[in-house]
């Protein structure tokens, strides 16, 4: 496929009787080549959650859209969230009722439109004797929170100390006064996967998207068009893309991009470093435990892909690139050990993976913050618009309000002389697609005994209608039902789907963002995981050994012969 034409989709042309999902192809080089073809209606810089929603909204509205990111899709901040979709119950303490109401309604919309990928989860809040918030206030707050969310979830419940211990038997009862539970939601398969699926929505609508493409320079020319100098971080070549409008969705790097674009925005970011540690499962998989850390902040133990994610820290930093420190680990481990009566206390040796990123918090140039003010900052977003140069910048935000970000960006870009529609651009496939996919899966199961062992529910959550393509491939060649990575039941057909449709450039893309393998296994476990090298052969071909060593050599001692 030589390049992409204006308004075309990067999927190969379907045969008679096939749908667009039957023959997917995603060539990164084709997308990079297409970036230089003509003038785009809009160029989105950044392929995190804000960039993905902006691209999906704009491309489905009819804008010729391009997206670039200096790293992989869904990287940086968007791969280090808590994986929670929540209305911000903690903002009630600051009396931010309007924000809580908006976030709760947006949570509800995500739950309705992504019923498989985003599911309700119960939060069990342990109220300690030393709690700074009176139990009565927590109880009333949980009901207010429920009403703000239009009673969309299961109602709150209050627990005595004995009842809470029955629900969460590991809690240290000597510290408890009682507890309560309420509901929010979580991303079942993780944040980065959700981001990629939104980008896939944009691609299906004709968007051109390229990972590992860095913005080297921005220039607004006299003819009213942005001239953007881009650099391929993999191949090293430099080239230009042109666009009538620009969307800065750079997340924590938005301020630097604004400086490059010479945009003097009112808002800017301050950063809060958040760290989560992933350990083997210590709590039931269907509930979140919320406790108060010794400094009074909320602290969570969250179910994640069969493991438990614990944290988080909340440390002010001036650098958008952060790392986990020993003090971060110590803070998290001390707090979880202090509140849970584990048979053996958790230590650093129990950490399977670490999630570390910054939360970009929005402040005005006029704000003067002290430490107390900074800790009260909420995760609200702000969209600024430089009408004179058709530049939109997204500040802040979180997964819960991603749909609102997409709508606001589309509205701003729509005032720049583009004729945009109000087409649907998010959500899981409808009943007809589900029924069609179910029939194709059933045919695959009848063709191959191994196909019956595949996790079709997970495949549907992750790949949607492409699940039917996976099933069709197995029908055509039953050997593709072979399970290559047994621990997650990842088949050869699924790996080929990832290879052909998801622009996987590095092993980390596959292990960290397209799957959760790097979040549920230690580096040492991963290096020798059954099927990992075979998966590399399928994904990278002749580059498999190079990509394997590129990822694992800095982490563990590897034997290239085995």
Image (cartoon, rainbow, N blue to C red):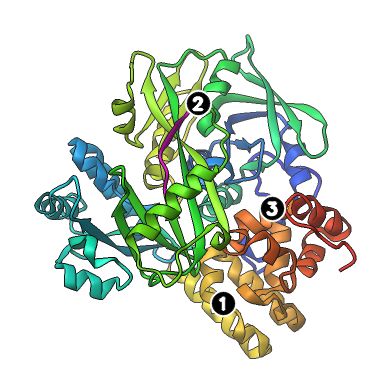
Q: How many marks?
A: 3
Q: In the image, is residue 461 above or below residue 298?
A: below
Name which quarter of the figure residue 360 lies in: top left
- Point out which mark residue 455 bears: 1
What mark, if any, has residue 318 been given in the picture?
2
Q: For marks 3 and 2, give the CA distance.
A: 26 Å
Whether residue 368 sits left or right of residue 143 in the image: it is right
Question: Which is more foreground, mark 2 or mark 1?
Answer: 2
Q: Residues within 10 Å of mark 1 (few under 14, many from 20)?
A: few
Q: Secondary structure at mark 3?
A: helix
Q: Nearer the viewer, mark 1 or mark 3?
A: 3
Of the residues under marks 1 and 3, which one precedes in the sequence? Answer: 1
Magenta-drawn stretch contains 17: no
Disc 3 marks which residue?
A: 508
Q: Secondary structure at mark 1?
A: loop
Decide which of 421, 58 is in the foreground and name it. Answer: 58
The residue carrying pointer 2 sits among few (fewer than 14), some (14 to 19) or many (20 or more) residues within 10 Å by Cα, namely few
Q: Position of residue 505 (x, y in %)?
A: 74, 50
Q: CA distance from mark 1 to mark 3?
A: 23 Å
Stretch in magenta: 312-317
Q: Earlier in the sequence, mark 3 or mark 2?
A: 2
Mark sitting earlier along the chain (2/1): 2
- Compare residues 213 and 429 and report the one nearer the observer: 213
Which of discs 3 and 2 lies nearer the camera? The answer is: 2
Residue nearest the viewer, comparing 401 with 81 = 81
Q: Residue at x 31, y 47 (%)?
A: 294
Q: Position of residue 312 (x, y in %)?
A: 42, 48
Neighbour tally class for label 3: few under 14, some 14-19, many 20 plus, Cα within 10 Å? some
Q: Helix, strand or loop at disc 2? A: loop
- Residue 14 in view: no
């Amino acid at each position: 496929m030589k390049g992409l034409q204006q308004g075309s989709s990067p999927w190969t042309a379907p045969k008679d009787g096939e749908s667009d999902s039957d023959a997917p192809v995603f060539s990164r080089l084709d997308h990079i080549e297409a970036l230089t073809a003509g003038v785009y209606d809009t160029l989105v810089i950044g392929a995190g959650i804000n960039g993905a929603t902006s691209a999906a909204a704009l491309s489905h509205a009819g804008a010729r859209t391009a997206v670039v990111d200096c790293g992989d899709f869904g990287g940086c901040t968007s791969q280090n969230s808590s994986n929670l979709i929540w209305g911000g119950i903690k903002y009630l303490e600051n009396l931010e009722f309007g924000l809580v109401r908006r976030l709760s309604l947006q949570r509800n919309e995500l739950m309705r439109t992504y019923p498989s990928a985003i599911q309700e989860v119960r939060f069990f809040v342990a109220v300690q004797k030393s709690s700074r918030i009176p139990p009565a206030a927590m109880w009333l707050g949980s009901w207010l929170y429920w009403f703000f969310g239009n009673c969309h979830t299961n109602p709150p419940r209050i627990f005595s100390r004995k009842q809470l211990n029955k629900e969460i038997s590991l809690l240290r009862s000597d510290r408890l006064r009682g507890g309560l539970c309420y509901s929010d939601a979580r991303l079942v398969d993780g944040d980065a996967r959700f981001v990629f699926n939104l980008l896939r929505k944009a691609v299906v609508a004709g968007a051109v998207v390229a990972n590992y493409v860095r913005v080297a320079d921005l220039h607004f020319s006299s003819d009213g068009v942005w001239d953007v100098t881009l650099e391929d971080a993999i191949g090293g070549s430099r080239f230009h893309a042109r666009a009538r409008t620009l969307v800065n969705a750079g997340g924590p790097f938005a301020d630097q991009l604004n400086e490059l674009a010479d945009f003097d925005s009112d808002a800017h970011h301050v950063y809060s470093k958040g760290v989560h540690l992933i350990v083997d499962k210590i709590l039931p998989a269907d509930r979140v435990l919320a406790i108060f850390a010794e400094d009074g902040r909320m602290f969570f133990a969250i179910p994640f892909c069969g493991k438990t994610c614990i944290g988080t820290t909340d440390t002010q930093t001036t650098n958008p690139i952060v790392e986990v420190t020993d003090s971060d680990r110590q803070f998290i481990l001390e707090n979880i050990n202090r509140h849970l009566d584990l048979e053996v206390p958790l230590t650093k040796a129990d950490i399977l993976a670490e999630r570390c990123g910054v939360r970009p918090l929005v402040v005005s140039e006029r704000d003067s913050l002290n430490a107390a003010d900074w800790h009260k900052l909420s995760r609200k977003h702000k969209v600024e618009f430089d009408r004179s140069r058709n530049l939109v910048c997204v500040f802040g935000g979180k997964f819960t309000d991603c749909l609102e970000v997409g709508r606001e960006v589309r509205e701003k870009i729509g005032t720049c002389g583009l004729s945009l529609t109000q087409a649907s651009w998010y959500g899981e496939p409808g009943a007809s697609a589900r029924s069609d996919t179910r029939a194709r899966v059933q045919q695959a199961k009848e063709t191959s005994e191994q196909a019956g062992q595949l996790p079709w529910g997970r495949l549907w959550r992750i790949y949607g209608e492409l699940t039917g393509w996976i099933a069709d491939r197995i029908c055509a060649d039953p050997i593709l039902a072979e399970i290559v990575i047994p621990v997650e039941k990842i088949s050869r057909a699924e790996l080929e789907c990832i290879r052909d449709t998801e622009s996987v450039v590095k092993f980390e893309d596959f292990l960290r963002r397209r799957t959760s393998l790097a979040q549920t296994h230690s580096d040492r476990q991963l290096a020798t995981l059954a099927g990992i090298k075979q998966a590399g052969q399928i994904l990278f071909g002749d580059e498999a050994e190079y990509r394997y060593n590129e990822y694992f050599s800095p982490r563990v001692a590897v034997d290239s012969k085995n």
